[in-house]
Amino acid sequence: MVVIGKKKYQAGEGAQFMSRKAALKKLQLTLIDFRRLCILKGIYPREPRNRKRAQKGQPGIKTLYHKKDIQFLMHEPIIWKLRELKVFNKKVGRARALKEFSDMKRYLSNHPTLKLDHIVKERYPTFIDALRDLDDCLTLCFLFSTFPSLKHIPRDQSLLCRRLTIEFLHAVIAAKALRKVFVSIKGYYYQAEIKGQVITWIVPHHFSFEPQAKNDVDFKMMSIFVEFYITMLGFVNFRLYHTLNLYYPPKLTTSDNSEKILVDEEAYVSERIAALSVPLVNLDPTLQNTEDEELEMDQFENENDATKLEEAMIEAEKIKKLKTIFKGLKVFLNREIPREPLVFILRCFGAEVSWDKLLFVGATFDENDETITHHIVDRPSMTKQYISRYYVQPQWVFDSVNARELLPVEKYLMGCVLPPHLSPFSDSRHDQTYIPPEERALMDPEFKLNDDEDESEEETENEEEREEDETEERDSEEDLKEEIESSKMSDGISEKELQRNRLKKKMKVKTGEVTKEDPWEKKRQERQEYRLRERMIKKKHRKLYRSMMDGRKERAKEIWLLRKKRRLHDTAEKQKRKEERKQKKAKIAE
């Protein structure tokens, strides 16, 4: 009997993967519709282990998908909607070409719409799953909220992004969930903690939109992502508002109609800020907010986790203080300040914020209010100043949030040279990372006292050495006295008794001496042991180990270069100060 074996590429990687061309043929979709469907369903191309087998021996590099993913797409009801849209476009195009405007109007009134609710529920079965994947969603929605009407972007998409992002900011303010902030060239980095999930997103700076000369950015592709993210963010906002006991869509507590009167061109910006300056209406005013309740941490009797539990309790206490860091402060923003981020941050931590009502809608108090505690300005001087308030620069707000305490305003006063704005997202505990002296001083308040500590240590060491020398001298004097006495007594004593006395002296308890280790010998031995351990590494892991060591050397070199750069900068600054002092002294002498 002839044994019928399996044909080539019928099993293994050859059977697992499918090319994009084959997928399009199987689904009977165009490339544009296939891309849209893959983005909405969260299916991406895969990289096989062996490309030759996966491509069934065909040359070149092809875009490959898992066969299971394509079979999963075959049962998607959106495919039929995409086909309906294709038919609809053909009908409208034909009616327009034949100038049958009544038919065209009828077709346009029955425009097929895509509903993505079932896809959101399918991709994110629980609320926590949606929160975990919210970083990209928020970043892209905040970016699109700044766009004007563009060629490949639907008209209502940017407006809807604006509305949803404002709603999310209101939810963060109500939950007091903001933890970290940072200003960079890209924009404002925010990090919030909602339901135990850490969410980080970027809000771009509010500049005028510069149109692209070339089609470097595929706005059409981005708008497909935004189409899905809008539906997802709507679900998240709805759930957040109800967990925070708030109405959705949000309702403002003030019944002032001044927001309807739009004075300037930046009408949307003013409305957005006005919305952030007023608290929202609760669903049930009798219910206490869950964030305001004092939660007690569970304590488990486990010796191993005692330190971890203590750290968690300290962290919880710090976060509790952080939530009310600006409580009781009344802040007024000057006209040159970026209002949106500062209003959001100050409101998150309990401050009252306002600005000039002639410039923007939604101001809650005027500049001449005597109860204002801080006036945030970004200019070297002001003609009219009030004694009852501090005039600080905007960086004071960001640095205070990251330090988790109200920093002293002396370094941030109007016209002062600001300290460096350090990122709270950099992991300083990571091995081999350069930590600037300012950050080290923030982490360790005793960092500046290192020189004094070294001097005190040297003094204590010298004192200990003196004491040791004195004790040795005393011991040697006592030994000499004993020897002299024994020599005097030995004249009238027999040899046996002398031997006994010698043995007794040997039996005497003496203070132990510390054996001094040779540091050079110790290092040499450690190096030899390290080389032996390196030789024991398996052959298949040696390349990985070498690349790790090379990376470590590169990082060490970078740190050394940065420290050298800092030293040169500090020496140059000291030299400048010395020259300035000399010039001042010379002027005074003249």
Image (cartoon, rainbow, N blue to C red):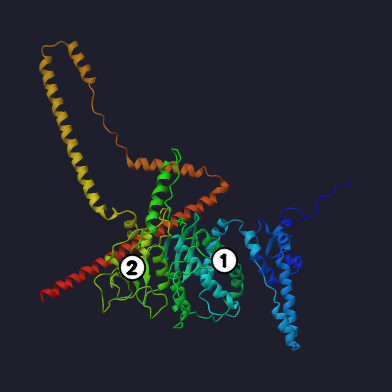
Mark 2 closeness class: few <14, some 14–19, many ≥20 residues within 10 Å: many
The quarter in which the C terminus is drawn is bottom left
Q: Is residue 163 above or below residue 47?
A: below
| View extreme (right): residue | 1
Q: State the image coordinates of residue 364 (x, y, percent, origin top left).
A: 38, 73
Q: Is residue 135 above or below residue 502?
A: below
- Residue 565: x and y in percent read 34, 64
Mark 1 to mark 2 CA distance (whole Å):
33 Å
| Label 1 with label 2: CB-CB less than 8 Å | no
Position of the N terminus, as image quadrant, is top right
| Amino acid type, residue under disc 1 in the picture | Gly
* Residue under numbered circle 1: 234
Asked whether 321 or 573 is in front, the reply is 321
Per the rendering, the mark at residue 330 is 2
Q: Residue at x 43, y 50 (%)?
A: 295
Answer yes or no: is residue 162 visible. Answer: yes
